[in-house]
Image (spheres, rainbow, N blue to C red):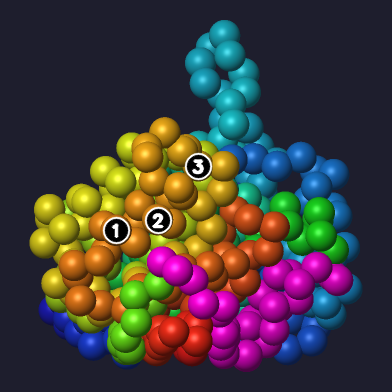
Amino acid sequence: MRNIFCFLLIAVAAASCGRAIRPEALRKGDKVALVAPSYWMPDSTISKACECIREFGLEPVVAGNVGAQMPVSDTVNRSYYAGTPAQRAEDLLWALKDDSIKAIICTRGGYGAIQMLPKLDIRELRRHPKWIVGYSDVTALHLACVKAGVMSIHGNMAGSLAGGGADEQGNKEMMKVLMGKRPRYDLQPSQYNINGEADGVLIGGNMITMMTLLGSDYDCIEDRGCILFLEEVGESMHAIDRLFNMLSLQGKMKNVKGIVFGDFTDCGDEFAYESVEAMLSAGAAGLGIPVAFGLPAGHGELNLPLIEGAPTTLSVTSRGASLAQ
């Protein structure tokens, strides 16, 4: 019991101070596991993703429940989920504990990763630090990694690998980060930007997934200076505005040193604002922190990788913005 308590203290202290573990960079020939934390994916798409991974010089290994579909009831045999929450958690733990596997790429998002969290002992993430790659619903796992004090990659998954192949820019950039590259992006000026410079630990991802976990054991905006990254898909302006205001109402903004907004894909336009970006810029105007718009990350055509839990510098001027990790 004493050892477990000491381990938790060390993990929490490391995460709070931003001293997260950076998993080892991959090398040619390394094994990469494909794991489904949310929705299932057809075998044909998985096969194409495996072909793409091989083109990058890595060896794909498919977890046992990737093609499973959880029964809903005695009369409905299939659902969207890739197995039960316990099965999905079992696959992730298998990939973590197998020393021959060097990284984990999630197959797709959708919904369901939050169901796994009660089934996971997040200390295993720190005991077996490996790059976990994904976005969208996988934001829940990124927050678990940050809480455990381990970096992870917000980036393309099996669907993008299958659809774009080895020549697609987001796939290439994600693989470079797996191989040890540290992201740095220079963004064009935006009329919605708010100038300034800030340093902090990058935290975030899909907006609604992250906000759902505010106040939980996976709330990573507690007691830290962070650079907050947010993106969304298919939500109304009402929902996005409500989620953003939750941060202030819960007192989270005092721990946010800067914000970088990614893509807001297929989102609503029901307010008088000309865009979601205009609405968010107005909401952030009084915070006194730098805010950058236009990072091609999330559900748009290009999804550039970011390292969650990594020390990050955000600089915003009239000439544009830069983000360096």
Residue 171 within the segment the image draws in magenta? yes
Please give the residue where the numbered disc 3 appears in the rendered image.
267
Q: Which mark is residue 278?
A: 2
For the residue labelled by badge 1, is the local secondary structure a helix, a strand or a loop?
Answer: helix
Q: Residue 88 carries which label?
A: none
Q: In which quarter of the image is residue 101?
A: bottom right
Question: Residue 57, image x and y in percent?
Answer: 84, 80
How many neighbours does mark 2 have within 10 angstroms: few (below 14), some (14-19), or many (20 or more)? some
Q: Which of marks 1 and 3 is in front?
A: 1
Q: Do the residues labelled 2 and 1 touch (CB within 8 Å)?
A: yes
Ranked by sequence position, the earlier of labels 1 and 3 is: 3
Mark 3 and mark 2 in contact? Answer it, CB < 8 Å.
no
Bounds of the magenta span?
A: 166-192
Residue 282 badge: 1
As shown in the figure, which amino acid type bears the numbered disc 1? Ala
Question: For the image shown, how many numbered marks are present on the structure?
Answer: 3
